[in-house]
Image (cartoon, rainbow, N blue to C red):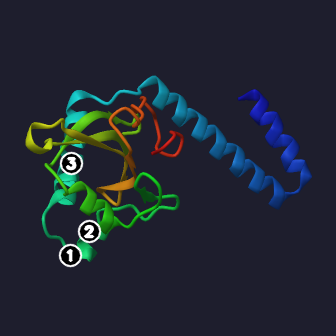
Amino acid sequence: MTAAGAAVSLLLAAGPAASQAQIGIMIAQMQSERANANCEANRRPGESQRINITNAINGLMRKLHAPAMPPTDLAKLFSKAKGSKVANVTQLISHTDLRTELTAGPPGQWKSFVVGGDHRAARGVWRIALPGVEGGPETVREFGFDFVLEGGAWKVMHAQEYPGPLYAPEPDPFCHAATASSY
């Protein structure tokens, strides 16, 4: 903190407008570093928080699997943040196409699921097992999802279909959706 005080003194000598901007940047960086340190130290949400978040996201997945939904309602389930994307194995696809992929079989379940340390993001691998034809082996499809809390509602930020059951990466514990690698 003493070094920060000395830096502020030097900035004030440089000129008021430039100093104020630089001081604001320094304060924001210190606050961000403190928030990240707190998040890293308290990475795991409490059991009740984790259950509440998981239940909310399971509700979102049920809506994605619902048989009929107007396009305007479907669009509300997806984040509009910069960098949001939905893709299949090879290319970006529409929200409607993702929903079609998810409803092609049984509802599915979480293979793995992690709630972010900030309790405002979550990641998981959704697994759908399609029964084999005439006693043949089942077909497994996996989708990686990033979820973010926006405006008080959980939304899909990223979704990615993977070509097989061993390709979807298991999500690691993380603090913020912005700092974690995504699907």
The circle on residue 74 is 2
| x then y, percent, for residue 48 | 20, 32
Q: Which residue is mark 1?
A: 70
| x then y, percent, for residue 74 | 26, 68
Which label's residue is closer to the chain start, 2 or 3? 3
| x then y, percent, for residue 28 | 63, 46
The circle on residue 81 is none
Q: Nearer the viewer, mark 2 or mark 3?
A: 2
Q: Describe residue 79's horizontal placement relative to residue 53 as left or right.
A: right
| x then y, percent, for residue 63 | 18, 59
Q: Quadrant of the image for the C terminus?
A: top left
- The number of numbered badges drawn on the structure is 3
Are the residues flagged by discs 2 and 3 in contact, CB closer than 8 Å?
Answer: no
Secondary structure of residue under mark 1 = loop
Q: Describe residue 117's horizontal placement relative to residue 24 as left or right.
A: left
**Amino acid beneath label 1:** Pro
Asked whether residue 124 appears in the rendered view, the answer is: yes
Q: Nearer the viewer, mark 3 or mark 1?
A: 1
- The residue under the point 23% across, 41% down is 139
Secondary structure of residue under mark 2 = helix
